[in-house]
């Protein structure tokens, strides 16, 4: 039985979806079979990042509406064998209810080692559905006040939903910019402000971001890839350093 993780953020623009795609590939490199469920109805993007957008016929709403079997709406990432995507619906009106999401994930989790659920930013429409079936949550934040302010509401909502494990990923970290901003004395202060246990730090990496936007695999000797690999190891229960 696989592990179900929802990937959230308090505000948009933290790089959450890029992290979901990169982390999925890192988990595959560790020998896992991984499914990424895109729950951002109306704003889906994981299919573009994994280079499968041209192949899409069905999405998660088609499963719910009985238009196809679940397997027909799950697409393999050709550049990363054993990484799969279940796309979000194109129309926000077709978002899946929390109850249906729990039922669907309960079936799918039998076939994957990890299911990563890419949640819409914030706690608005779609958040509860995305998090409904999760056993743990990763809050993705940047080391800046506006991003961290959103962590409070997300963390509180996740606790209300009785998700037992809530972890923090500091994404797109640039030490020079962090020092220039001069809001927090150090990263410990950022972690305290976020109020969640740190799982990993991903450095700012324009090359990795560009690959994701082009639908190319985020792999090779990139700073972000090394960070994704360490986070994947920790999610798998292995020891891996937190530092950059």
Image: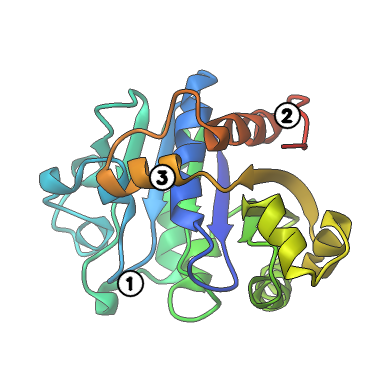
Q: Do residues under tags 1 and 3 come within 8 Å of each other at their CB atoms?
A: no
> In front: 63, or 49?
49
Q: Earlier in the sequence, mark 3 or mark 2?
A: 3
The residue beneath circle 3 is: 36
Q: Residues within 10 Å of mark 1 (few under 14, many from 20)?
A: many
Q: Secondary structure at mark 3?
A: strand
- Which secondary structure lies at badge 1? loop
Q: Is residue 231 left or right of residue 131?
A: right
Q: Residues within 10 Å of mark 2 (few under 14, many from 20)?
A: few
For image coordinates 69% across by 69% down, the residue present is 144
Q: CA distance from mark 1 to mark 3?
A: 16 Å
Q: Nearer the viewer, residue 143 or 163?
A: 143
Quadrant placement of the N terminus: top right
* Residue plotted at (48% across, 66% down): 13
Camera sees residue 67: yes
174 or 69, nearer to the observer: 174
**Mark 1 highlights which residue?**
95
Q: How is the image coloured?
A: rainbow
User: Quarter of the image containing the C terminus?
Assistant: top right
Residue carrying label 2: 237
Q: Are marks 2 and 1 in contact (CB under 8 Å)?
A: no
Identify which residue, 71 or 231, lies in the foreground: 231
Sooner in the amino-acid sequence: mark 1 or mark 3: 3
- How far apart in space, not on screen, are marks 2 and 1 (Cα)? 33 Å
In primary-sequence order, the first of circles 2 and 1 is: 1
- Indicate the position of residue 236 as horizontal and vertical percent values: 66, 29
Q: Determine whether 102 is above or below 22 in the image.
A: below
Image quadrant where residue 229 sits:
top right
Please, what secondary structure does the residue beneath circle 2 have?
Answer: loop
Separation (CA) of disc 3 from disc 2: 20 Å
Determine whether, in the image, residue 73 is placed left or right of residue 231.
left
């Amino acid at each position: 039985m696989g592990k179900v993780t929802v990937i959230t953020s308090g505000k948009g623009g933290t790089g959450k979806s890029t992290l979901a795609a990169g982390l999925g590939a890192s988990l595959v490199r560790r020998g896992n079979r991984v499914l990424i469920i895109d729950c951002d109805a109306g704003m889906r993007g994981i299919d573009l990042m994994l280079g499968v957008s041209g192949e899409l016929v069905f999405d998660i709403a088609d499963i719910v509406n009985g238009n196809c079997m679940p397997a027909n709406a799950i697409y393999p990432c050709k550049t990363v064998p054993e990484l799969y995507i279940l796309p979000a619906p194109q129309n926000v009106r077709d978002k899946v209810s929390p109850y249906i999401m729990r039922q669907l994930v309960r079936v799918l989790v039998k076939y994957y080692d990890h299911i990563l659920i890419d949640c819409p930013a914030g706690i608005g429409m779609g958040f509860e559905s995305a998090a409904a079936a999760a056993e743990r949550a990763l809050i993705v934040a940047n080391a800046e006040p506006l991003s961290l302010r959103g962590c409070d509401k997300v963390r509180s909502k996740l606790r209300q939903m009785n998700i037992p494990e809530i972890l923090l990923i500091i994404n797109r970290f640039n030490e020079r910019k962090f020092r220039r901003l001069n809001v927090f004395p150090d990263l410990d202060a950022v972690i305290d402000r976020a109020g969640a246990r740190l799982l990993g730090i991903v450095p700012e990496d324009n090359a990795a971001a560009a690959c994701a936007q082009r639908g190319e695999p985020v792999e090779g000797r990139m700073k972000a890839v090394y960070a994704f690999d360490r986070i994947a190891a920790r999610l798998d229960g292995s020891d891996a350093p937190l530092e950059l």
